[in-house]
Amino acid sequence: MSRHTLSLLCKRTLAMGLVATAAAALAAPAAYAQQLVRISAASIDTDALSKSLVTFKDTLEKSAPGRFDIKVYPASTLFKQGTEVPAMQRGNLEMSTMTTFEVEQQIPEFSVFSTGYLFRDYGHMKAVFASPIGAEYAKKVEEVMGIKILQPFYLGTRQVNLRKARDVKGPDDLKGVKLRVPGGPGWLALARGLGVSPTPMAMPEVYLALSTGTIDGQENPLSIMRANKLEEVTQQIVLTSHLVQPVFLAMALPIWNKLSADDQAKAMAAAKVAADANDKARIAEEKSIVDELQAKGLKIARPDTALFRKAVMAQYESSGLKAKWPAGMYERIEQVK
């Protein structure tokens, strides 16, 4: 073999090696690419929910090293409150928190799950979503909305919070009060049942609206009220306990379907760890928060909640929402132990 021929063979071997190396390098990212997961939430960074989303991030990234790049965006810093669900459906967002009220806007019969005074307490709410009812709910959300529910979290029990104190014994005593609520038919019906004039508004706008008198009050779990420092611009809490509220950690279904079965299992496990952390913190806050807020000078009203419950149910009847509920679903939920 001549020196020239040997040189050509060496060059050809080297070129083939470089091509193979380049091909392997190009294939590697496809095999080992991290999944970017941005989580959008309206809760501020000091709230238990936002902290639990960081717990989800840390837990999943630890259990599946190198597989996920998770970024948490609290306080509506990535998407405005109310736009997160459409963003997931358009493919513009991977994960978000999602309420039953957002679900009912696309699945009207599921407005039953947003009914005031439906869940007796935290334990009842969690039991419902852990039952076959919860499985039916999650399946329908996947089919209709293209969203995967990973886990229900406890957002808290919602109470009315007023800018100016008044004597409140029932819904009639809240007549004319401009009360901030999130948007949607279910919220409007619930608010009218409480006796107020509902004023839809995103949560980040509430503090300023209360301080200027644009609204007369708001309703939220007390831990969220405190996290947003709303006691600085309000005088009274009315313990209506009108809604024991879940909030879901949800993922866009196309993103979920891209994950391996192992990564899906790890994501579900991480969501359970995060939900447990959130719920534990939320329940602990609720045990002491009324006394703490009262010590800060807020007045506490303890009205007869039976009056509010009766008025709220009448609103669901008159608004036509009740007629959309699946037959027997309300009774099935009530019967869960």
Image (tube, rainbow, N blue to C red):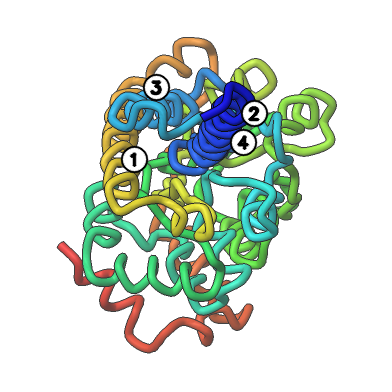
Callout 4 secondary element: loop
Instruction: Measure the C-alpha gap from mark 1 to mark 3.
Output: 26 Å
Within 10 angstroms of label 2, few (less than 14), some, or many (20 or more) residues? some
Q: Position of residue 100 (x, y in %)?
A: 50, 59
State the residue position of label 1. 271
In primary-sequence order, the first of circles 3 and 4 is: 4
In primary-sequence order, the first of circles 1 and 3 is: 1
Report the amino acid beneath label 1: Ala
In primary-sequence order, the first of circles 3 and 2 is: 2
Q: Is residue 96 left or right of residue 181?
A: left
In primary-sequence order, the first of circles 2 and 4 is: 4
Q: Is residue 172 above or below residue 1?
A: below
> Residue 190 versus residue 164: which sits nearer the camera?
190
Callout 1 secondary element: helix
Report the amino acid beneath label 4: Ala
Instruction: Measure the C-alpha gap from mark 2 to mark 4.
Output: 4 Å
Q: Tell me which corner region of the image, top left, top right, bottom left or bottom right, holds residue 38.
A: top right
**Eye-nearest disc, 3 or 2:** 2
Q: Residue at x 50, y 60 (%)?
A: 253
> Residue 163 versus residue 24: which sits nearer the camera?
24
Q: Residue at x 62, y 68 (%)?
A: 105
Q: Residue at x 34, y 79 (%)?
A: 329
Callout 3 secondary element: helix
Position of the C terminus, as image quadrant, is bottom left
Q: Position of residue 124 (x, y in %)?
A: 24, 55
In the rendered image, is residue 235 in sight?
Answer: no
Q: Is residue 314 above or below residue 206?
A: below
The label on residue 289 is 3
In the rendered image, is residue 327 in sight?
Answer: yes
Q: Tell me which corner region of the image, top left, top right, bottom left or bottom right, holds residue 2.
A: top right
Instruction: Measure the C-alpha gap from mark 1 to mark 4.
Output: 18 Å
The label on residue 75 is 2
